[in-house]
Image (spheres, grey):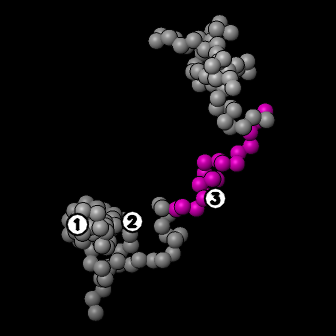
Amino acid sequence: MSKQPIYHPNQDFVCPQCGLRSVVRAEEIVAGLFEVVGKRYVCSSCGWQIPDEQIALSSDKSSDRFHSTDDETLNALFGENLPVANGLTLEDEATRFCKNCKHYLQSPFLSRCLLHNREVEPLEVCEQFSLPSYEKS
């Protein structure tokens, strides 16, 4: 009984065909123009197709760390429920940029606050922020 190596999707391995360190990559088998009829696993470097009997497919979702769709994990990463300072929402804070203020003057050479009579950056946040008159509803 020969002992053949078992490969997993996204596994780092040394390809027996090309001899390079590579990764097991999944490819869809397409019939015609758009019909997907199956999946095969190949070496990312040379394209050598790994025999199906040497592929170990697990049904455990924890091994598929690159394609997580867990909403709680994404919310924790991007901070959906972050506390906000000064009683403002994140949307309010984002609209208080100098570039959105009625006192902001932009020219090709500098950005200036006409209220404070100084040079400012477009994404600075100011306590005396005022909406331009055309944006008030």
Residue at coordinates 39% horizontally, 65% vertically from top-left? 10
On screen, residue 64 versus residue 84, left or right, reads left
> What kind of residue is marked 2?
Asn
- Closer to viewer: mark 3 or mark 2: 3
When the figure is inspected, residue 76 is found, relative to residue 112, above or below; the finding is below
Residue 32: mark = 1
> Which residue type does callout 3 highlight?
Glu
Q: Where is residue 82 in the image (x, y as percent from the top left)?
A: 70, 45
The residue positioned 78% from the left and 33% from the top of the image is 86
Q: In this view, does 1 lie to the left or right of 76?
A: left
**Which class describes the residues within 10 Å of circle 3: few (<14), some (14-19), or many (20+)?**
few
Task: Find residue 17 and report its horizontal and vertical position in percent.
Answer: 20, 69
Q: Nearer the viewer, residue 80 or 31?
A: 31
Quarter of the image where one finds residue 31? bottom left
Q: Dot 2 corresponds to which residue? A: 10
Q: What element carries label 2?
A: loop
Image position of 108 with respect to 32: above or below = above
The magenta stretch spans residue 16: no
| Front one among 133 and 13 | 133
Q: Which amino acid does label 1 sit on?
A: Gly
Quarter of the image for the N terminus: give it: bottom left
- N-terminal of the pair, mark 2 or mark 1, is 2
Mark 3: which secondary structure?
helix
Magenta residue span:
68-86
Q: Residue furthest bottom?
A: 1
Using the numbered discs, state the Cα–Cα distance from disc 3 to disc 2 in whole angstroms.
24 Å
Q: Nearer the viewer, mark 1 or mark 3?
A: 1
Q: In this view, does 130 lie above or below 67?
A: above
Q: Mark 3 points at which residue?
A: 72
CA neighbours of label 2 inside 10 A, class few (<14), some (14 to 19), many (20+): some
Q: Which label's residue is closer to the chain start, 1 or 3?
A: 1
